[in-house]
Amino acid sequence: MTRRQVCTAILTLLLIPFLRAVPALAIGDKVVPHMVNGADGGLGYRTKIDITNISYYLNTTITKVTVYFYKDDGSAWILGVKDPATGITQNTSSLPLNLGTSQTLRIETSGTGPFGSGFAIIRNLEATSPLPDDFETAITVFYEVLQSGNIVDTVSVPIGKPTVSFMFPVEIDKTVTPNLLTGFALVNLMDAANQVVIDLYQNVVPQSGNAQLYPQSATITLSSGSVTKKIARFLDEAQFFPGLTKFKGMAVGVAQGPVAILTLLQTPTTTGGVQYATLVPAYLDALRRNSIMYLPQGFALDADLPSVDYYRDETATGDTYAEIPWDILFETSSTTIRQLTPQQGATVAPIGIRSVEQFDSISIETLRSLGYGLSSIDMRDGSGNLQEGYVFAIKTGLGQYVKVRVRTVITYSGSTNKDLVLEVYTFK
């Protein structure tokens, strides 16, 4: 069935290599896309990384996390790094960590020596568990710019995400000194040449009108080698949009394969210097809100993600913390009686039988106008709800609105269970 068509030192950024595979049942790698350290042009640079053990249960110590430092070409980068356990600065290209429950450790580069830039991989090889935050870390990264020993700027460095379709805000004003400029960095995450096309859309007045497409596009070809694996530039440079003097709007990029992007705004200050702000890109390939979910009888749906956890069913006992994220439990009462029961602050509203087209046309305004409650939705044998096309709405425990349609009811020979295949659309 056919359905629903749809370069300054501060900007020498973002080299993400191909990450080596990690063992099965491990948390995995996270990449700090940019690190700087040392002195350049009268300024000093140092990077700080805060790593927090966010495990819920006490005595969940993380011992298999190591931070690896790399130069832009992917070789090991030996840095002066303050060991968070001892406070002693050591020269190393890797640093193993030992994190107690809810502990935060700060890794800080020395800020001394010649200027260099690179990246870091934070590798977590702890075993997984049914809880999403068990043996997991939260990571915050920023670097400081110093002049005469005083901090003059702090720049946030978000963890990079792979994408093939992205957009970011753009502002350029070369009528002021220093110039107001938008810069970006791209890195090829493919093991092959990767072409990226960037288009600009300029704001117009009134803003209820469509933005104006800039007449030229910029095409970048990133190779798989270290020479052109990354690119870091301002948008007004010759290779991109040299005719721009004053511009406000957005850039849209489409890549043949995955890339990572970081964007910065260079802003003039009253002292005659500049400061840098991290701009937030939108990942267009991560905006999909609809999914087909398989919900076995006895299991629960987290409609925010959406996700069904195969570790825990209705027979599980123990800490109720494990059930906090779930919005609907497909609950068993007897061999013939079952229901969809709201969980943990979620509420539901029955809608009824709807066709594919009618389901698609249900808007967020319609969902917000429904009357939600805690009553379970009857899915017993013979119920009019237990059939293809039945639609209901969820207001999740996080306050998001979700529409759900039963696509298929699955029955089994020799079993009284009924499983559901659901069409789920979450308004995020």
Image (spheres, rainbow, N blue to C red):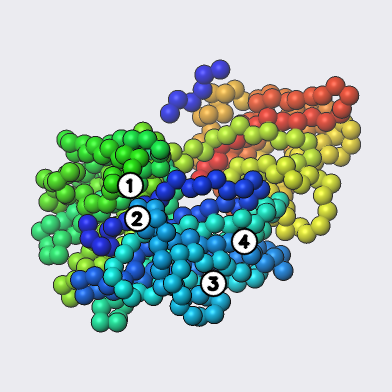
Give the secondary structure at mark 3: strand
Label 1 packing within 10 angstroms: few (<14), some (14-19), many (20+): some
Q: Earlier in the sequence, mark 4 or mark 2?
A: 4
State the residue at coordinates (44%, 38%).
285
Give how far across and how far down residue 191 sits, in percent.
40, 38
State the residue at coordinates (60%, 42%).
306
Q: Are marks 4 and 2 in contact (CB under 8 Å)?
A: no
- Quadrant location, the N terminus: top right
Residue that carries the numbered disc 3 in the rendered image: 105
Q: Earlier in the sequence, mark 1 or mark 4?
A: 4
How far is the residue under mark 4 from the one under mark 3? 14 Å
Observer-side mark, 1 or 3, equals 1
Image: 406 above or below 24: above
Position of residue 310 in the picture relative to residue 114 (left or right): right
Q: Earlier in the sequence, mark 1 or mark 3?
A: 3
How far is the residue under mark 4 from the one under mark 2? 25 Å
Q: Earlier in the sequence, mark 4 or mark 3?
A: 4
The amino acid sitting under disc 2 is: Asp
Residue that carries the numbered disc 1 in the rendered image: 226
Residue that carries the numbered disc 2 in the rendered image: 72
Q: Are marks 1 and 2 in contact (CB under 8 Å)?
A: yes
Give how far across and how far down residue 168 sits, in percent.
32, 48
The amino acid sitting under disc 3 is: Leu
Give the secondary structure at mark 4: strand
Residue 64, labelled with which disc? 4
Position of residue 376 in the picture relative to residue 369 (left or right): right
